[in-house]
């Protein structure tokens, strides 16, 4: 059996597959080695995952973990934790960007983009991510993300750059004051998640021209500052909740910036199941003649 994980800081999606068939899907809290100790990560895996796949846990022979915060120096930590839990398994730990690229392109080259609370992109050669524009977080970057979208929207609202009455409508909808917005952004933890939460209200009001223009401009900035530096004409594909729910505006921005955006997915798991299943299939002479 093969166990696949797609992990962010908030939530981890796990999928257990056997001979290409999905046997179980489990959600646990997120795993990010930048913010959690080895003991905390192991606790999540044992307490939230193993208790729900206990009858199959000893049959797991391969673990593929794709996660946020997985940089080269962090991968061995997570790998060691997973190896302690799944003692009989071969463990591979990779970044969420490589997971997105494999899910979107399988073994074909292209430019993979993640647009969720944060944003990221990479030039994929069909095997590895060979170039990556650093996202830099929502203060210095993360163009196209939900956090940057919220930052731009909150600023425009409070500066009177949105239609009359929209600020009052947002404050009533969110049960906040302008002072609360400032408090949440500058003095509370996880301001990126808070700003990204504004995307729900933004989506509800996307028919307002000023709101739509702000969203499209945010995506155009993503293509100009993150994708254009690759200097590639390869197809662009995107994954993530912001990409999925704002896909009309994302496609419009791609066209305006002269990129071909031919696929958008909400999550990478289905593509990762396909990739990992193909990787597990034994090679035969027929494969050589069909390639």
Image (cartoon, helix red, strand yellow):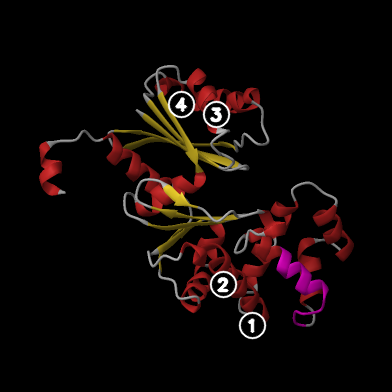
Residue 78: mark: 3
Residue 122 in the image, given as x and y percentages of width and height: 48, 54
Element class at badge 1: helix
* 3D distance between C-alphas at marks 4 and 2: 43 Å
Mark 4 and mark 2 in contact? Answer it, CB < 8 Å. Answer: no
**Closer to the N terminus: mark 4 or mark 1?**
4
* 3D distance between C-alphas at marks 3 and 1: 46 Å
**Closer to the N terminus: mark 4 or mark 2?**
4
Residue 49: mark: none
Is residue 3 depicted above or below 87 in this figure?
Answer: below
- Of circles 3 and 1, the one toward us is 3
**Closer to the N terminus: mark 2 or mark 1?**
1
Does any portion of residue 169 appear in the rendered image? no
> In front here: 174 or 230?
230
Instruction: Name the image quarter holding residue 60.
Output: top left
* 3D distance between C-alphas at marks 2 and 1: 16 Å
Residue 220: mark: 2
Q: Which residue is mark 1?
A: 209
The quarter of the rendered structure image containing the N terminus is top left
Element class at badge 2: helix
Q: Residue at x 11, y 37 (%)?
A: 285
Q: Which residues are magenta?
A: 151-163
Mark 2 and mark 1 in contact? Answer it, CB < 8 Å. Answer: no
Element class at badge 4: loop
- Of circles 4 and 1, the one toward us is 1
Is residue 20 depicted above or below 57 in this figure?
Answer: below
Q: Main secondary structure of the magenta part?
A: helix
- On whether residue 152 falls in the magenta region, the answer is yes
Residue 53: mark: 4
Is residue 15 depicted above or below 132 in this figure?
Answer: above
| Position of residue 216 in the picture relative to residue 102 (left or right) | right
Q: Residue at x 65, y 63 (%)?
A: 199
């Amino acid at each position: 059996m093969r166990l696949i994980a797609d992990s962010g800081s908030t939530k981890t999606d796990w999928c257990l597959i056997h001979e290409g068939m999905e046997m179980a899907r489990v959600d646990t809290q997120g795993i990010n080695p930048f913010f959690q100790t080895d003991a905390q990560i192991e606790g999540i895996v044992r307490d939230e995952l193993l208790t729900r796949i206990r009858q199959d846990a000893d049959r797991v022979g391969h673990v593929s973990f794709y996660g946020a915060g997985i940089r080269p120096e962090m991968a061995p930590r997570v790998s060691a934790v997973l190896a302690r839990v799944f003692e009989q398994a071969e463990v591979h730990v990779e970044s969420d960007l490589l997971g997105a690229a494999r899910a979107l392109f399988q073994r074909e080259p292209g430019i993979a983009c993640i647009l969720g609370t944060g944003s990221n992109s990479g030039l994929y050669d069909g095997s590895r991510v060979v170039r990556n524009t650093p996202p830099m977080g929502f203060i210095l970057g993360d163009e196209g993300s939900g956090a940057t979208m919220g930052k731009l929207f909150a600023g425009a609202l409070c500066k009177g750059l949105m239609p009359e009455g929209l600020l009052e409508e947002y404050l009533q909808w969110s049960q906040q004051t302008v002072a609360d917005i400032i408090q949440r952004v500058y003095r509370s933890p996880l301001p990126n998640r808070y700003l990204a939460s504004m995307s729900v209200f933004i989506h509800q009001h996307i028919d307002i021209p000023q709101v739509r223009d702000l969203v499209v401009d945010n995506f155009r900035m993503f293509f100009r500052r993150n994708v254009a530096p690759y200097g590639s004409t390869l197809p662009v594909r995107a994954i993530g909740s912001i990409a999925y729910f704002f896909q009309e505006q994302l496609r419009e921005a791609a066209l305006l910036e002269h990129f071909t955006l031919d696929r958008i997915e909400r999550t990478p798991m289905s593509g990762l199941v396909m990739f990992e299943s193909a990787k597990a299939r034994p090679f035969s002479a027929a494969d050589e003649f069909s390639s």
